[in-house]
Image (cartoon, rainbow, N blue to C red):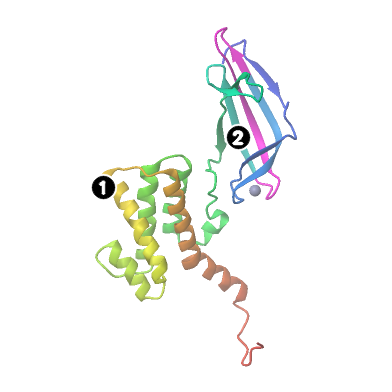
Amino acid sequence: MTNSDKLTLNSGVNKDVNVQCPRCVGSTAHKTLANATMSGGDGQMDWHTDYQILQCNGCKSISFRSESSNSEDFDHYIDTYGNDELVYRITEKLYPPRIYGYSGLGEDRWLLPDSLRRIYDETSSALTTDQPVLTGIGVRAILETLCKDKAADGGNLFKQIDDLVSKGILTPARASVLHQIRTLGNLSAHEVAPHTPAQLSLAMTVVDHLLEEVYILPAKTQRLFSGLKPTANPRP
Ligand SMILES: [Zn+2]
């Protein structure tokens, strides 16, 4: 920042911006509660960054977004009349970090055992901050922690997952999917090979469903239905 840089406050209040919500599934409309725009240049290059406090119109979560552009970073666009137009590329950053199409377990994480929640949080953070090798290793660590928590028998993760089927904790179909995810984590750990964001998002979605099935839904059911006793002659 130099003395010639310009600060403008709250020029975009109440404007709607579509971004991935930290809690809702998918991209939602967010209202701009406040914003600060910094702009400047050195005679050869101009730049501007807008820092925004946003609120999701759906769940009312508050989060932060910045969008930056500069006069050196643009695409050419040909309009319907054949005119060449310049469109500046916008670099977007979101805090807390998140990725489009993945919302995670949210507050339900608190229904996980401590050891699982710790590795789950670290892996989610690695996923949303673009650390693909660590995400792959984390996915495998989540599976290993779950197997340990459920006292799965077997000398390796493959056998332990199958043992959870024998114990009635996993369905065979779920185990089959987990074997593929397990392989993904193997490659990350031993080959230091990154996977694509789409592969890792899907792997974490599978992990989320697994944790919901094994921990979260049973805990919620226990809380909400623990006072209800099955009737002797249930109505059809
Ligand atoms: Zn929301």
Q: Is residue 40 above or below residue 21?
A: above
Looking at the image, the residue that sits furthest to the right is 14
Residue 209 horizontal/vertical position (percent): 49, 61
State whether residue 16 appears in this view. yes
Residue 162 horizontal/vertical position (percent): 33, 69
Q: Which residues are magenta?
A: 39-61
Q: Does the numbered disc 2 mark a residue whose Cβ is under 8 Å from ligand 1? A: no
Q: Secondary structure at mark 2?
A: strand
The residue singled out by tag 2 in the image is 65
State whether residue 146 appears in this view. no
Quadrant in the picture for residue 16: top right
Determine if the magenta segment contains residue 43. yes
Q: Secondary structure at mark 1?
A: helix
Determine if the magenta segment contains residue 111. no
Quadrant in the picture for residue 78: top right
Quadrant in the picture for residue 175: bottom left
- Front residue of this view, candidates 222 and 11: 11
Looking at the image, the residue that sits furthest to the left is 155
- In the rendering, which numbered label is found on residue 28? none
Position of the N terminus by quadrant: top right
Left or right placement of residue 39 versus residue 124 in this view: right
User: Which numbered disc flags the more N-terminal residue, 2 or 1?
Assistant: 2
Position of the C terminus by quadrant: bottom right
Determine contact: label 2, label 1, CB under 8 Å. Answer: no
- Front residue of this view, candidates 128 and 215: 128
Name the residue located 40 percent from the left edge and 43 percent from the top edge.
196
